Image (tube, rainbow, N blue to C red):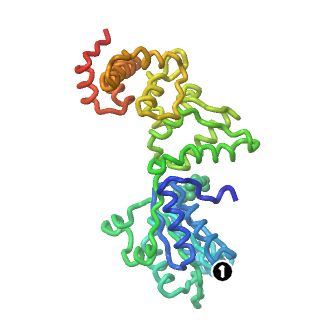
Amino acid sequence: MINSQILGNSSSVIELKKLIDTVAVSDTSVLISGESGTGKELIAKNLHSLSRRSRHKFIAVNCAAIPRDLIESELFGHKKGSFTGAIGDRLGRFELANGGTLFLDEIGDLPQDVQVKLLRVLQERVIDPIGSIKPKPIDVRIISATHKDLEAEILSGGFREDLYYRLNVLPIISPPLRKRKADIVLLFEHFSKIYSKNQTDNITLAPCLVNAFESYSWPGNIRELSNISARLTTLYPGKKSLRVVDVPETMLPNGLRKFLGTAQKDKTGSNRVENLISLAQGDDRKVVENTQEEDLNHNLDADKSLKEKLAEFEKRLIKQALIESNGNVTKTAKTLNVQRTTLIEKINKYSINLT
Ligand SMILES: Nc1ncnc2c1ncn2[C@@H]1O[C@H](COP(=O)(O)OP(=O)(O)O)[C@@H](O)[C@H]1O
Ligand SMILES: [Mg+2]
């Protein structure tokens, strides 16, 4: 199943997959923490499908999406006539998941009164449908997830400590995408394959765009990367080696657009500073796309020492970046990813003069 696999070879994902394998066979409660879009639900599904419960159902409930006054009935069910609008008996999600796994997403949003009831279910292994006089025994594994800091919620009185310990027997942390940068290309191309009309039609990224993607913080995590992949796959079907300059700024993620800044792109349609940064970072995957860049690093005096050549190269790099940001030091510092004060020191040291 192409959509349910946890992809990635970064060390944090390898650790995560190992932990999932270990934890899946047990029957204890798991609490998955992590930012939105990091794959918490995917982890929960993997835990279910690797467990002895896999032949039974995986039922997901988003505690943040269900209106407050319906959540109890949604979870535990109700008997006909037990409240206005209860026109028939209704099975709750606990019963639907019986024998399988119940995934309680955004558990931090569960109202206090329902927290008490959930605690009882976890302790007694029975549910009380609304309006029913007989508790029903239930056998489900609880996996919950949250993007909130539940320990902070406990301190502020929003979440019950006793429930927290019941849910958090086995904690799993889903790392943000910025902590698994090594997987960005793999994930992007995976999503591009899915979004392409045919499976051979996926797009690939040029080193400059890989570099930009790896520098970006991805606040929406893998979901955001998936959305960008869908967008670029639609705009550039089958395009190989897509470059930053190929993509209009409005089509890039908001934060990334700000990060790159407008001044980087020169009129020839090439992005020189980015290439230079790649070169400076010694990334051998980087391809110089424009001979103008070569001008910057050849003609370095062959008789000079490595240190002198590096200094000369650094000076040219800074000068070029300054030109491309119209002399804006703050912008240049950002582009080159150095402190503004460091940049100013270097400008003085090399007596760089733009006029
Ligand atoms: N490691 C991964 N490999 C492949 N797809 C992933 C991975 N992590 C997340 N996804 C996909 O990203 C999207 C968001 O994941 P989801 O589990 O809904 O995140 P969360 O529950 O943390 O908000 C889903 O489409 C999911 O399939
Ligand atoms: Mg989710």
Q: Residue at x 47, y 85 (%)?
A: 123
Amino acid type assigned to the residue bearing label 1 in the image? Lys
User: Where 54 falls versus 325 (above or below)?
Assistant: below
Q: In this image, 306 relative to 4: left or right?
A: left
Residue situated in front as seen by the camera: 277 or 300: 300
Query: Would residue 148 be visible to someone looking at this image?
Result: yes
Q: Position of residue 318 (x, y in %)?
A: 35, 22
Toward the bottom, the furthest residue is 134
Q: Residue at x 41, y 18 (%)?
A: 324
Residue situated in front as seen by the camera: 316 or 265: 316
Label 1: how many residues lie within 10 Å, few (<14), some (14-19) or many (20+)? some
Is disc 1's CB within 8 Å of ligand 2? no
* Number of numbered discs overlaid on the protein picture: 1
Q: In the structure shown, which secondary structural element does the residue marked by tag 1 occupy?
A: loop
Q: Position of residue 49 (x, y in %)?
A: 64, 70
Answer with the quadrant where ligand 1 appears in the image: bottom right
Q: Position of residue 313 (x, y in %)?
A: 36, 22
Determine the image quadrant of residue 279.
Answer: top left
Quadrant, the C terminus:
top left
Q: Position of residue 45 (x, y in %)?
A: 60, 66
Which residue does the numbered mark 1 point to in the structure image?
Answer: 80
Quadrant, the N terminus:
bottom right
Q: In this image, 305 relative to 289: left or right?
A: left
Q: In this image, 284 relative to 154: left or right?
A: right
Query: Would residue 70 be visible to someone looking at this image?
Result: no
